[in-house]
Image (cartoon, rainbow, N blue to C red):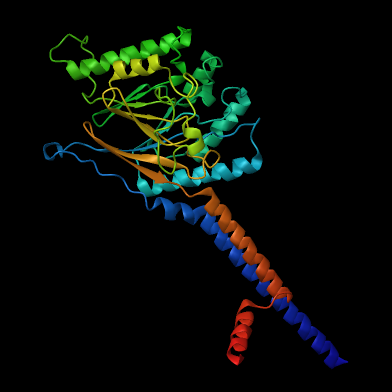
């Protein structure tokens, strides 16, 4: 009887060891996959990005350079369209991508080109406050890194939804500074939603503000004697970089190319003025008033590069979120007062992460079946197959 009990106890102990071994292996696999997909993959992918070099002439080699990141269309969901799983997954992706980029790349300033929120055009005061809190957590940054934001149509509404209240609410969170100068460079941040050109109160104020900025820029570029500009401090003489949400007018994305351009079947679809792009008139006004050397915009969620007027380049920055693209990205810019260089930094692909999780799930199933005896060990199966091959 004692021998029987001893044998039963030994079997029970062996079973416990097998279960503990299985649990340990499952835990190790789950931990390794989570660590890779939720942390390490961002470092591995973004580590390959590097700041471009500016081809500055030798006699200007003493110019200061500015390292700037440009991203767009984060579209943080609100209480109406928001689904907890989508919020968790896509917002975690943006948080890890942004925080990893700050740590690895060390930018001096970050510009977000509109549509920070998805439901700002109709969200209640409480919903707005909740969305802002999430934004500030995701895009937290050190004090030495400046964060500049322009408004998009999802933040304050299209022209017919826009109101003074929504604009003030947005500007209370994000500095409404339209003209930003640093290291001898000028940046003009435009509320492109207000450039409807129909004489509405908000539009008239936006246009008057841009005309005043134009006057300051022209004075700084052309001032040769005292008094012409009223004695106000002059801005840097550098031509500005124009930052806005809506792109300047173009017929379509037909001439856009690259792996993050719009899908082929969508590129030839004509754009609607004042909806997909600015109107011809507003576009010409901005080019004439500001005479920018570079334009960056968002809104389309896809990449494109076009030339305006006398060859002014405009870069459409793709969406930063998996919600809008499988391959989100941002622009890295190194700028001087007379030159600039841009490079694109891609984030991890969403389908790569999903495929990794699927492979890991399959591996877990195999481990469970092997330990349950329902499937022979792969090593044993391979050994038996090799022996069978040798005997034949």
In the rendered image, residue 270, in percent from the top left (x then y), is placed at: 48, 25
| Count of marks, rendered view | 0
Left of 137 or right of it: where is 219? left
Q: Residue at x 37, y 53 (%)?
A: 48
Q: Nearer the viewer, residue 83 or 362?
A: 362
Q: Which of 384 and 225 is in front in this view?
A: 384
* Quadrant in which the C terminus appears: bottom right
Left of 265 or right of it: where is 282? left
Above or below: residue 30 compared with residue 162: below
Residue at far right of view:
1
* Quadrant in which the N terminus appears: bottom right
In the rendered image, residue 72, in percent from the top left (x then y), is placed at: 45, 34
Above or below: residue 204 compared with residue 78: above
In the rendered image, residue 273, in percent from the top left (x then y), is placed at: 46, 19
Classify residue 221 by image quadrant: top left
Q: Which of 287 and 109 is in front in this view?
A: 287
Q: Which of 125 and 204 is in front in this view?
A: 204
Classify residue 220 by image quadrant: top left
Residue 263 visible at all: no
Above or below: residue 288 compared with residue 332: above
Residue 129 visible at all: yes
In the rendered image, residue 73, in percent from the top left (x then y), is placed at: 49, 33
Residue at far left of view:
59
Q: Residue at x 25, y 32 (%)?
A: 183
């Amino acid at each position: 009887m004692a021998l029987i009990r001893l044998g039963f106890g030994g079997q029970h102990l062996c079973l416990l060891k097998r279960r503990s071994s299985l649990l340990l292996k499952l835990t190790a696999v789950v931990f390794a996959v989570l660590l890779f997909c939720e942390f390490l993959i961002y470092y591995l992918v973004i580590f390959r990005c590097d700041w471009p070099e500016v081809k500055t002439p030798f006699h200007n080699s003493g110019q200061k350079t500015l390292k700037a990141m440009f991203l767009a269309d984060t579209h943080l969901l609100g209480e109406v369209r928001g689904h907890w799983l989508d919020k968790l997954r896509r917002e975690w992706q943006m948080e890890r991508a942004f925080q990893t980029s700050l740590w690895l790349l060390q930018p001096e300033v970050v510009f977000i080109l509109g549509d920070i929120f998805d439901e700002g055009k109709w969200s209640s005061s409480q919903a707005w406050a909740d969305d802002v809190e999430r934004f500030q957590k995701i895009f937290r940054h050190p004090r030495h890194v400046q964060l500049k934001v322009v408004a998009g149509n999802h933040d304050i509404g299209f022209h017919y939804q826009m109101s003074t209240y929504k604009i003030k609410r947005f500007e209370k969170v994000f500095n409404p500074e339209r003209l930003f100068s640093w290291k001898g460079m000028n940046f003009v941040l435009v509320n492109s939603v207000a450039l409807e050109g129909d004489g509405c109160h908000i539009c008239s104020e936006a246009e008057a503000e841009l005309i005043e900025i134009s006057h300051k820029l022209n004075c700084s570029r052309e001032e040769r004697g005292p008094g012409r500009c009223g004695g106000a401090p002059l801005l840097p003489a550098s031509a500005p970089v124009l930052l806005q949400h809506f792109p300047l007018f173009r017929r379509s994305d037909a001439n856009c190319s690259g792996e993050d351009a719009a899908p082929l079947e969508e590129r030839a679809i004509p754009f609607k003025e004042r909806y997909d792009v600015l109107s011809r008139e507003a576009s010409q006004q901005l080019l004439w008033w500001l005479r920018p050397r570079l334009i960056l915009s968002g809104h389309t969620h896809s990449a494109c590069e076009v030339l305006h007027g006398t060859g002014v380049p405009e870069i459409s920055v793709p969406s930063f979120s998996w919600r809008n693209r499988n391959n989100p990205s941002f622009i890295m810019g190194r700028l001087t007062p007379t030159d600039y260089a841009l490079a694109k930094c891609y984030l991890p692909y969403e389908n790569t992460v999903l495929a990794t999780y699927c492979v890991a799930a399959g591996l877990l199933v195999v481990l469970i079946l092997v330990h349950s005896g329902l499937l022979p060990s792969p090593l044993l199966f391979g050994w038996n197959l090799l022996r069978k091959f040798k005997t034949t």
